[in-house]
Image: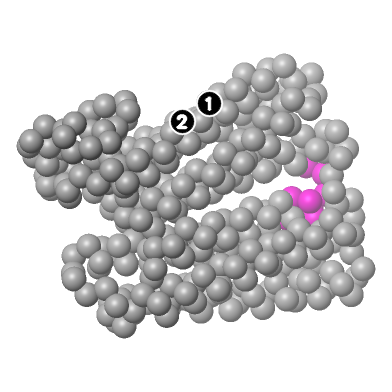
């Protein structure tokens, strides 16, 4: 079981890395760095220089009838590394599925659950190809992010389930009020991440289609989604403060308080990078940590909710 749990841990780590790499791709505008899929400019290993491409490469590799931008090796390799990390994650999920048959004696349904995760990662790969072929349509990108979060939740659930099988959960006491608040925070943060994905795509389209990319022009362009996204963060911070104060008053177990505190620090990091995005014209170097802090806080909150509900074996 320990080897199986290590595979779960590395799969969770791999999922976070893929999400971070995707954020870097978005922040650097590298989403179309590889205009085809699963190849990159028709090759398994992408070119390093424009001289390795045919003279009419812009016509050859049109996306949805649109001519691609000039070749940029940085953007190409940024997208390619993102894909490589996705492949490594896929291999880990395949290994997890295979290993689940060796631990059937603990729980006979483990292969079925891991098979579901394997199916999910295959669908995610297909959606990734669709993101490229549809020229980065915002709705498809949001689905791509949604599936990544579902995969993360599935792996975190599996990890907690295995901890219960081994009776090694970090929180033993059930607290229904704390669980209720935590579930609200999970839902709110989940929506917040998806809203942020939509806002990011609005900014990408604006910067691509116009030459005006100052903080003021971007803010004037953004619609109500952005203002809901920005205001919602205050609600999340307020709920976090209430939950931390509640745990402190109840002298709750250290495991629950520690998870909440870590998630709160991630939310603060998310807010501070959001302020940088808001007031400094959406700088590319603030975008990946903004998303990553949000996803980290979501993962920690979901782990907290699983622990607060007690054993998953009932």
Q: Which mark is residue 253?
A: none
Quadrant for residue 238, please give it. Answer: bottom right
132 above or below 173? above
178 above or below 155? below
Residue nearest the viewer, comparing 267 with 110: 267
Residue nearest the viewer, comparing 136 with 44: 44
Which residue is pictured at 79% across the width and 51% down the height? 307
CA neighbours of label 2 inside 10 A, class few (<14), some (14 to 19), many (20+) = some
State the CA–CA distance, disc 1 to disc 2.
6 Å
Give the x, y percent position of residue 117. 56, 33
Left or right of residue 251: residue 243:
left
Left or right of residue 80: residue 97:
right
Q: Secondary structure at mark 1?
A: helix
Are circles 1 and 2 on residues that touch, CB within 8 Å? yes
Quadrant for residue 233, please give it. Answer: bottom right
Q: Which residue is mark 1?
A: 91
Give the x, y percent position of residue 45. 32, 28
User: Which residue appears farthest toward the top when viewing the image?
Assistant: 102
Residue nearest the viewer, comparing 42 with 54: 54
In the image, the segment drawn in magenta is 305-313
Which residue is pictured at 26% across the width and 33% down the height? 47
Give the x, y percent position of residue 81. 41, 38
Q: Secondary structure at mark 2?
A: helix
Indicate whether residue 236 is drawn in magenta: no
Q: Which residue is mark 2?
A: 87
Indicate whether residue 309 is drawn in magenta: yes
Left or right of residue 289: residue 306:
right
Left or right of residue 63: residue 159:
right
């Amino acid at each position: 079981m320990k080897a199986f749990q290590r595979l779960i841990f590395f799969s969770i780590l791999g999922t976070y890395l893929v999400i971070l790499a995707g954020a870097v791709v978005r922040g650097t505008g590298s989403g179309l760095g590889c205009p085809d899929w699963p190849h990159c400019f028709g090759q398994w290993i992408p070119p390093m220089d424009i001289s390795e491409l045919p003279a009419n490469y812009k016509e050859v590799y049109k996306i949805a009838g649109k001519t691609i931008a000039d070749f940029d090796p940085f953007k190409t390799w940024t997208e390619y590394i993102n894909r490589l990390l996705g492949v490594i994650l896929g291999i880990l999920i395949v290994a997890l599925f295979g290993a689940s048959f060796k631990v059937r004696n603990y729980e006979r349904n483990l292969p079925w659950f891991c098979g579901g995760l394997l199916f999910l990662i295959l669908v995610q790969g297909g959606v990734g190809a669709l993101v490229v072929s549809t020229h980065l349509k915002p709705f498809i990108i949001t689905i791509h992010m949604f599936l990544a979060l579902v995969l993360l939740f599935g792996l975190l659930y599996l990890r907690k389930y295995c901890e219960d099988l081994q009776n090694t959960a970090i929180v033993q006491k059930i607290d229904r009020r704390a669980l209720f608040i935590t579930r609200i925070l999970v839902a709110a943060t989940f929506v917040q991440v998806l809203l942020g994905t939509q806002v990011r795509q609005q900014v990408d389209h604006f910067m691509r289609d116009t030459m005006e990319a100052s903080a003021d022009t971007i803010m004037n362009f953004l619609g109500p989604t952005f203002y809901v996204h920005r205001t919602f963060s205050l609600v999340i911070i307020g709920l976090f403060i209430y939950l931390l104060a509640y745990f402190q008053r109840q002298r709750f177990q250290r495991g629950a308080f520690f998870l909440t505190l870590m998630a709160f620090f991630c939310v603060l990091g998310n807010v501070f990078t959001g302020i940088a995005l808001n007031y400094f014209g959406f700088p590319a170097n603030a975008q990946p940590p903004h998303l990553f802090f949000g996803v980290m806080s979501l993962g920690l909150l979901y782990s907290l909710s699983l622990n607060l509900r007690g054993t998953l074996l009932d």
